[in-house]
Image (cartoon, rainbow, N blue to C red):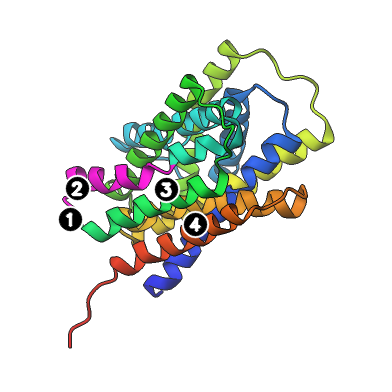
Amino acid sequence: MSRNADLLLTAIAPAIWGSTYLVTTELLPDEYPLTVAMLRALPAGLLLLVVVRQLPAGAWWFKIFLLGALNFSIFWWLLFVAAYRLPGGVAAIVGALQPLIVIFLARMVLGSAIRALPILAAIAVMSGVTLLILPPEAALDPIGLAAGLGGAVSMAFGTVLSRHWQPRVSPVTFTAWQLTAGGVLLLPAALWLEPPLPDLTGANILGLVYLGLIGAAFTYILWFRGVARLAPSLVSTLPLLSPVTAVILGWWVLSQTMSPLQFLGVLAVLGSVWASQHAQRPKTAH
């Protein structure tokens, strides 16, 4: 499969992740970040394990639990904390630091070259996200900001290490292992640190099923497939498509207005992501 096809398939994942904001606010109970993250990861991981019927072996147990913690347990927990405490999408702006973090981590872990154009494109993406979702009255809650930054660092480490550690299994199996490990790590924290969930409504169940099967199992199969095939610096800007989807869904489903600045932000994010990919295309011989 061509590089462009791999990029398009991988980009489907963050585009779908953008619906998480809508589903969380409209369908899920408030103030249960650990429980919601656990219910998103563990059932989906166990279902995929039933399908693949394969477990890690040897040193891979440690690696999988570390990756599960970075990509799911820590990242999703901090993501929900930031989403609850940073209204107006400030969490996504803090998360937009992730491409820059990935570029420097990939240099340290994988020996990848640091190039000026991808860095400039990453900065442009952050500017586009700011235009897209930052209202003038946005609240800068310190705990929320720390959670957003911590989540960006966690996913950046998870992305780089997922590329560095590649087991000889399918993306479905790799996803099953990590989702299950992440859910297992979240389970005791959810039970000990949060009160029991209230009786779930049909809407709550629908939201959890969607986040587990579509927002986790399906999308992360595509994501880890892309991480295995593409350089970390290439995939690191793709999650910034998520706030674009979130704003478009808010306009389409919730009838939220889209200001000229937000429209400019959409164009800036899409243009910057394209520029980042174009800057890293392999040079053809003449």
Name the residue carrying label 3: 126
The span picked out in magenta is: 96-112
Decide which of tag 1 and tag 4 comes sooner along the chain.
1
Can you say whether 202 is above or below 19 in the image?
above
* Secondary structure category for the residue under label 4: helix
Q: State whether residue 69 appears in this view.
A: no
Q: In this figure, which residue is indicated by the disc labeled 2?
A: 107
| Inter-mark Cα distance, 1 to 4 | 25 Å
Q: Nearer the viewer, residue 284 or 205?
A: 284
Q: Residues within 10 Å of mark 1 (few under 14, many from 20)?
A: few
Please determine whether, in this image, residue 245 is positioned above or below residue 216: below
- x and y, in percent, of residue 161 in the image: 30, 43
Q: CA distance from mark 1 to mark 3?
A: 21 Å
Whole-percent x, y for residue 203 in the image: 80, 37
Q: Mark 4 to mark 3: distance in Å?
A: 24 Å
Q: Which residue is mark 1?
A: 113
Give me the disc on residue 222: 4
Q: Quadrant of the N terminus?
A: bottom left
Q: Is residue 55 above or below residue 277?
A: above
- Are the residues tagged 4 and 2 within 8 Å (C-beta)? no
